[in-house]
Structures are given as C-alpha cells and as structure tokens.
Image (spheres, grey):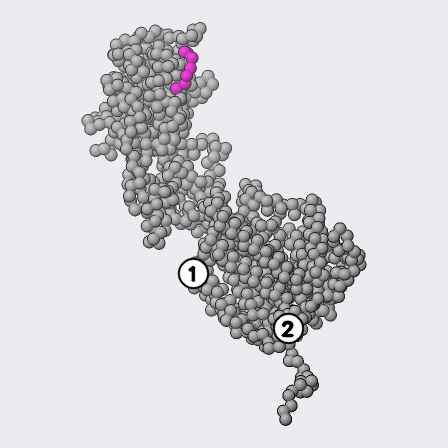
Amino acid sequence: MSSTTNTTTIGTIGAPSRRNTELAMLIFAVLIPVFAYVNVGLAKDGSVPAGVLGYSLGLGLLAGVAHLVVRKWAPYADPLMLPIGTLLNGLGLIFIWRLDQEPSLGKAMAPNQLMWSTLGVAFFLAILIFLKDHRVLQRYTYISMVVALVLLVAPVFFPGVNGAKIWITIPGLGSLQPGEFAKIIIAIFFAGYLMVKRDALALASRRFMGLYLPRGRDLGPILVIWALSLMILVFETDLGTSLLFFGLFVVMLYVATERTSWIVFGLLLSAGGAVAVATFESHVQTRVHNWLNPLELLNGGVTETAQAMYSFGSGGILGSGLGQGYSRLILGIAPKSDYILATVGEEVGLAGLMAILLLYGLLIERGIRTALAARDPFGKLLAIGLSGAFALQVFVVAGGVTGLIPLTGMTMPFLAQGGSSVIANWALVAILLRISDTARRPAPAPAPSTDAEMTQVVRP
Amino acid sequence: MNKPLRRVAIFCGLLVLALLVRVNWVQFVQGDALKNDPHNRRVAIERYSTPRGNIIVDGKAITGSTTTDSGDFKYKRTYKSGKMWAPVTGYASQAFDANQLEKLNDGILSGTDDRLFFSRTVDMFTGSKQKGGNVVTTLDAKAQKAAFEGLGTQKGAVAAINPETGAILALASTPSYDPSTFAGMSNKDAEAYSALQKKADPDEPMLNRALRQTYPPGSTFKVVTASAALENGLYDDVDSKTQSPLPYTLPDTSGIELKNEGNIPCENATLREALRVSCNTVFGKISADLGNKKMKAEAEKFGFNDPGINTPVRASESIFPKDNRPQNAMAGIGQASNRATPLQMAMVASAVANGGKLMKPYMVDKLVAPNLNVVQQHTPQEMNRPLSPENAQKVQSIMETVVKEGTGTNAQIPGVTVGGKTGTAQHGENNKDNPYAWFISYAKTDKGTPVAVAVVIEGSDTLRDDIAGGRLAAPVAKRVMQAVLEGEK
C-alpha cells in the first residue's frame, strides 16, 4: 500500500490549476445547448423560440457562478467534470423541452427540470463551499448506513408507480426517488467501513480452493448488503437499484482489499440472486422476455421496447434533426425519463448518441482518475465508489434502452427528467470535485530545514 | 490500491465501449431494417407527409388531399362524388391501408415509385417536397354518372366498355360507400369503416360488384351459346329453323323438362326468334348438342375461366364449368354453375359489337409523373377472337332484333342501332331467392361502336319472368349508352 507516495501527479511545484481550461470548456458547454435550443425552435415552429434569451442567460449564469465558486473554493479541482455536467444537464433540458412540444406526452416538464437543475447546482455549490475536506464525511460512516437503509426501505410504504416502488410521495411537494441519494450516502458508508476493515478483509482469511475466504464477522456486512439488494429488488421491483448497490459494493471491496476473489464472489452471488429472483418474480421475467424479443407485438400493438428500437433505427447515423423525430410514439411518461436516450438516438443520430456516451465515459474516467490521484484511502474509496456507481447507472440505463441488457427503471444521469436524479448527480460531481481538489492541491512547501544552512558552503 | 483502480478504470471503459458497440449495431447495422419495419409508424407518417397524387377522369381529379391537424399524418385523402367513384378508385385510408387503384398505383400516387426516380432526384436538389404522380383513367364521367344514377337505390352493378379499345367507360356498384368517410384515423373514421363491413351491413357497400362479384348470367349468356353454335357450324343461318322440340327434356335425365318462361313460340324457332323471345329450350339444346368441351372453349374465348383479368384491378374469375350433360345444358342458358361478373358480360357484348374481336379491358390510360411526364401508357391489346367477323355480324343482327322487337325494347335509342340481350337469372335453392335482372347491350352509330354495357340488378322484386331484365336493367343500360353517345358527338 503506497497510495500516498505513488501519486505522480502531485509535486511541490504544484500542478497548474486549469481553471481557465474549465472556463473555456464551460463556454462551449453553454453554447451547445443554446444552439440546440434555437435548432429545436426553428425545426418545430420555424422561428427562434421566445425563451432562448432567458434560457441562455440562466444556463450561462449557473455555469458562471459554478465556475467562480470552483475557482474560489476548489481551485485545483478537475477541470472537465463541471463542463461535462453542465453540457449533459443543458442538453437534457433541451431534449425535455423538445418533448414538451408533443401534446401527446402530457404536461410540460422542462420548467420544473430547470428549477431542479438550479437547485442541483445550488447543492453542488453548497457542498464545495461548506465541505472543506471530504475526510469529514468519514465521521458519518455509521450514520450514513442508517440513513441509506431508511432511504432504501422507505418506498416500500408508498404506492408503486409504473410497476416499480422506488418513490416517496410527500404531499404538496411531489415525489422523491430516495435511491438516487442513497447511492451517494451508501458510497460514503462503504468507503468509511472498508477503510477501517480492509486489512482484516484482505489478510485475515483462509485459503479455500484458490480463493481467499474472509472471516464471518468481516463477511457478514457483505452478505447483509447482498440480501438487502435482493430484498429491494423483490419488494420494490427495482432491478436497477439492487444491481447498482451490489455492483458498487463489489467494486469498492475489490479496490479496498485488492483481492480478485471478491469479484468472483460478487459475480457468483449476483448471478445466483438474479436467477433465484427471476424464477418467481414475473416483473423480471417480463423484462427479460422483452429484452429477448424486442420487436414482438403485444395484443397486436407495438411495444414500448419496439418503439424505442424503431426510434434508434430511424435516427440512423446522422439523425432526423432536433425536433424532427417521432420518439413521441413511445407513449407515457417514459420518453422524458428512462427513454430519453431514444430521442437522442433518433434526433441527433448515432453520431450524437456516441458523443453523449463518450461524455459519460469521460466523466467516469475523470472520476476514477480522481480516485487514483487521491492521497488518502477514504478519498480513493469514495471517489471510486461514486464513479463506479455512476458508470453502472449509465451502463444499466443506456444498455437497457438500447437493448443490450434487460431494461431496468433508472434515470440517465443529468439527461433524464427527474428532480432527485439531477440534484443527486450534481452532489456526486461536487464530492468528486472536492476530492480532486484535495488530490491535486500542491503539497505544502516543506518546512524549512535547519540542516539546510549547515550544508551551505561557508566561504572564507 | 492503484492496481485495482486501474482495472476498474478499464472495466468502466469496457462498459462504455459495449454501449458504443451496441448503438452502432442498432443504428448502423440494423438501422435500415428498423427504419423500414412495417410496424414502424414512421413509414406511414412518411407516406402521408405529402399530398397524394390524383386519380383523373376526363381531365379532372376525382380525388384530392386535405391537411389534417390531428394525429401524426399531415394529409388525408378526399374524394369527389366518392360513392359514385368508389368502385374505380378504391380507398386510401390512414388507418385501413388502401385497395384497388389507390393500392395498385400507390407507388406513383405517393411518389415513391422507382419510375419517378428522376423527378424525385430533381425535387431533392430543388429542395421541394416529394410529390405524387397522377393516374389517368379511361372512365367517362357522364357514363359513370348515368350508371350510378340509373342504379339508384337498387342493388346492382354496371360495367361499360369501349368495344374498339377495351377502355372501361363506367364501373358502378350499388349500394356504394364514400371512401372519404374513413380516410383519416379518428374514432369517427373507425366507426364509419366498421359500419361498412359485411357484419354491420349485409348489403356489403364495399363490395365492388362490377368486378368482384359473380352472378349466374342467365339468358344474357345465350349470346355466347349462339356464338358457339355459329362458330362450331352447328347452325349457319340465324334465320333458318333449328331442330328444337318443345318440350325439351334435359339429356341423360329421366324426363326433366327444361322450361320456357310463359307460352313462347320456341318449337324449331330460328336463332333470331329464339334470342328475341329468349327460348331456354333452343339454347339448352344447342349447349347439349355442342357438348361441354366446345361450350367451355367458346366461353373461355370470351374471357371465362381466366383468373387473371387485370384492369389493373383484378376482376374475379368468371366460370363456365366443366360439367355433365344436363348441367352443361343448363349452363348454356346461364344457369347451373355458370358464373359471370358484370365486366365479363360487358366483354361478351363488346366482342360481338367489335366484329368478334375481344379487346383487353383496362381502366388506366396512363401514369403521369408530377412533372407531367408520362411514366406508362396503355396501348389497346387484343385479348382473343371469339367470333369470326361474319358470325359476329350474325350475332349482332339477332341482338339488334332483341332490342327492336323482342324483350329488350326498353333499350331503344332513336337514330342509333342498339343490340342487346335481357336476362333474369334464378338463384338460391329451388330458385326461391329473387332473381337477378340482367341486360347486356352495345350501341352503334355510323362512326363506330363506342360502347358496350352490362347491367345487373339484384333482388328485382318479385318479377320472375324473363322480361325482368328488360324492364329493370335495360333502361339503365340505355342511359349509359346515351351518355357515351352524347360525349361522342
């Protein structure tokens, strides 16, 4: 273990802060959605939409304030994450606004989403300003666990929406998806727990058939989490969240212990769990069936899955153009949330969709790079946990919508409509930025050494 | 911890790579198949995104397109005098696809036909929207109106042909439907459509009786039987006596008599007299004497037993059956298993009127590109020669007698030579259903023979005598012939 000595990015000279790079990219991240906004207006009505000035100013202001806050409170933070978040969030707003233009898809959601995005950025700023050091979070390891469990279990007591019980309804305020926040909080708990237990898990184990088996008291919490994730799946019919949590835990465990056996365990346990659940949970069986037969007709009609595939196919390489697709054929509320990638695929084509997937990829890898650069094990674990969760979420959603894996109900971070999601993801990026700021900050200049003077050549 | 971190980084990279590969597979490899999948609604949206080309009669469009503000489809089909033209146009509906000319020429009308490649390419460069071409028909608006109004509230059909070219001049079927009523895709359209189905309306307004319904042709078939007698040399002269006993017993039966309607002079009657009063005995015997093979061969020369008569809308196959002797004798007077479409009987009249030469019936004169270039032009084709010119003259002469002083006097037109034949076909078990009233005819002037018509009217009240065809169907035929002749002047 040599995490503190092996960080090649840290030197006494100090890495360049890269704040100007961030500013330049932020300008693009604001301009691209603004152009997209104008584009949709021109395509749908033949005129520049009335709200374009307000929207550009709003997005510009948000990005500008965020930049200034980063410059002041996290000057050495990674320069890519904020622009990528801004661009994805901005494009998400455009796609939601574009889908608002379709009367068949229900009431307008873009204004709300804009409000939630503003709130998300405010949350982001608050974290950067008030969380001076991410290691403070370490103190809340067990509180985090309790909070995460409460958040996860809470939706059981609320009615399900669209077949999945993943919502908490607060009268007068709307509904909340606690899973999104639980993702961050549980990463904090895992990071704290593993930092303490990793030596015990890695070393105090017996060798069995080439695998290292840890002691029961160390293994216990893992099995508890595994059982919990399956329970979420069963009671809330939320395949995505359980996969996310379990995957998150396996990845963090692997990083903490450096034992490949954890990956093997994880795969075995999740495969066993998935098969066991799939045998009696009809919801899961339907999803798998739809995945295997995407174009199947249901009661003589075209299914949502097929409509999404048609959207992707009709988009082709270059897409139909913003505002000129027919992804409204995917009925219900899903086009603006889970299925928003279908609109992306149809209207900006393969080229645009790949660009967006690469943006996600870039954000994930910057997060992992932050983990690599972090100097403390807690920061490393937290950063990899957050990035890993983000990566799994992107993979599960995008893979589900494009038919790579069975569909699960999760939101595309930043892009999809949903208040909880956008706030939680801004918070996630804020924590990653805070860790990267700590990691890239130049080491304090060495204390003046008293020996230094003695080695000086004394001239006669 | 950095080694596992790097591995996780690679793993996350692979996840993103898998997504990239997958979207390439879906959007690039499978893209075209998904895009053109028949269940992909965008295909239909595309089809109705531009106004459809028109079906033209007498230089005027009988169809149109109108913009709709509801739903995905921008344009929908409209029809002028939809009920009258429905047997010609068919329908094109956003919700219920299309049929007949609308369907057969869909490529031209929607502008996607490969033969419009040039005009499409020009449109692409000039940036104008894809346009549909037009279908120019051979129909005669006045004749069609006369036919449709002549049928009125009765159930029946009219087919009129120009004997010299085979061009179809009128094609009416009643009761009819207005294709405009379900051209869109609203609930109202769906209701209108289901109300027209056989389940809801036993009169089957959407059945194209002129082309798609076969009836026993009754006495009008005697024209074919007379032709067969002359062509096979059974009789040479239409005015010499035939050897026909009265009563006539069907061959191979133990005394089943073929009856005539009423007390008409049929014993050893001449062909002229037999056709004038419509003797069953004479023609039944001719059919029996010639035998099934020869009768069938002659009927086939007129177009029977041909499943592929495309106008281009395919007409149902008219049947002259292979049958035993008594049945064959009955078929000779248009009964038994003998079945003909109104178009088929119009073809019979037109072949006789055209000197024995049967022209292939057609109703699309040309297909025109949006830029008015002719994409396809029909040239009249001879289909067959069921009669020699001399025998055609003879059959004409006896058909003219029918109109002059026989059962078809209701079809007389002053100053015009009209030849015709009435028919009343019995059907149902023991002939208990109302018979079909038939009339086939042609009109001749000194300038030529511009029209041959077949009219059939179903459920002709209680009239069971052979005069029914003359009384009910002949006036309709007369109106149609007059309408065509007026246009000729």
Give me the disc on residue B2.
none
- The kind of secondary structure the magenta stretch mainly shows is loop
Indicate the quadrant where residue B292 lies.
top left
Residue range corresponding to the magenta coloring: B320-326
**Residue annotated with mark 2:** A438
Q: Percent position (x, y) of residue A108?
A: 53, 59
Q: SS for tag 1?
A: helix
Q: State the quadrant of the N terminus of chain B.
A: bottom right
Q: Is residue B200 left or right of residue B466?
A: right
Q: Percent position (x, y) of residue A376?
A: 69, 70
Residue that appears at 65% across and 79% down? A444
Indicate the quadrant where residue A85 lies.
bottom right
Earlier residue among tags 1 and 2: 1
B216 over A38 or under it: above or below:
above
Name the amino acid type tagged 1: Leu
Q: Percent position (x, y) of residue B26?
A: 52, 49
Q: Percent position (x, y) of residue A80?
A: 55, 68
Say whether residue A73 is visible: no
| Chain letter of disc 1 in the image | A
Based on the picture, tell me whether residue A46 belongs to the magenta stretch.
no
Q: State the quadrant of the C terminus of chain B.
A: top left
Name the amino acid type tagged 2: Thr
| Residue in front for this viewpoint, B119 or A191 | A191
| Chain letter of disc 2 in the image | A
Give me the disc on residue A42.
1
Based on the picture, tell me whether residue B322 belongs to the magenta stretch.
yes
Q: Is residue A260 left or right of residue B247?
A: right
- Binning the other alpha carbons within 10 Å of mark 2 as few (below 14), some (14 to 19) or many (20 upward) gives many
